[in-house]
Image (spheres, rainbow, N blue to C red):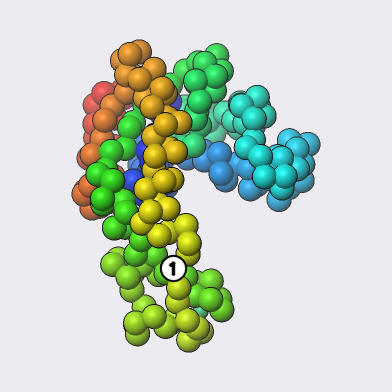
Amino acid sequence: MRLVFLGPPGAGKGTIAERIHAVLSIPHISTGDLFRKAIHDETYLGKQVKEILDSGHLVPDELTTEMVKERLAEKDAEKGFILDGYPRTLPQADALNKFGHPERVVNFMIPEEIIITRLSGRRVCRKCHATYNIKTSPPGADGICDVCGGELYMREDDAPEKITKRLHVYADLTQPLIEYYRKSGLLMDFDTNRPVDILVPELATILKNDLG
Ligand SMILES: [Zn+2]
């Protein structure tokens, strides 16, 4: 089963991928994880990625594609994969068609106000950087870290107006991709505004019936 997961930050894409890949017996391949691992292992591509990211630039399509292509050539991806964070652009989607044509592209959909509520609840400890969510995983005492007693604060990026901006940047970037996959008949809209415990088995069943 060759799958691509698309969705804005806060839509639960990573969480669902992390849980569903075991059910479907295919690896969850996230470009974020690939970059971090290559940098950590100081591979040839990893060194290039580090240099680009350190200089504040985006990793170019060709380099990202090269890393994904290498990863898909590994044994565990023979029976399929879940791609998370790739493709992000039309050139990447064209490239992917040549080495791992997706069978289904799942478009994780959730209302913007729900994402804002979720992400704006995040609080971080100033001392030990432990993270909490005042809605879903609050600390024992308001504003105080359970681990070290440090003060909790909201990161600038998690302010509602910053989240809105991030969501709009994401939408502008991926809209052409969504249209591309919709036209090719591969896109499947999936409403993620429900508990993960319900979403994971539901999506697994749909995909198995559809592609299995
Ligand atoms: Zn702390």
Horizontally, is 173 left or right of 47 in the view?
A: left
**Percent position of residue 190, x then y:** 26, 35
**Percent position of residue 102, x then y:** 43, 21
**Percent position of residue 106, x then y:** 34, 31
Horizontally, is 8 left or right of 127 in the view?
A: left
Point 66% across, 39% down: residue: 57
- Which kind of residue does numbered mark 1 sit on? Met
Q: Is residue 192 visible?
A: no
**Percent position of residue 209, x then y:** 24, 26
For mark 1, give the secondary structure: loop
Against 132, residue 94 (above or below) is: above
* Mark 1, residue position: 154
Against 142, residue 15 (above or below) is: above
Q: Is residue 20 visible?
A: yes
Question: For the N terminus, which image quadrant?
Answer: top left
How many numbered marks have been drawn onto this rendered protein structure? 1
Point 63% across, 48% down: residue: 36
Against 109, residue 187 (above or below) is: above
Residue 45: quadrant of the picture: top right
Point 36% across, 56% down: residue: 160
Q: Residues within 10 Å of mark 1 (few under 14, many from 20)?
A: some
Horizontally, is 158 left or right of 43 in the view?
A: left
Point 45% across, 31% down: residue: 173
Which of 67/157 is in front? 157
Which of 23/139 is in front? 139
Does ligand 1 reach within 8 Å of label 1's beta carbon? no
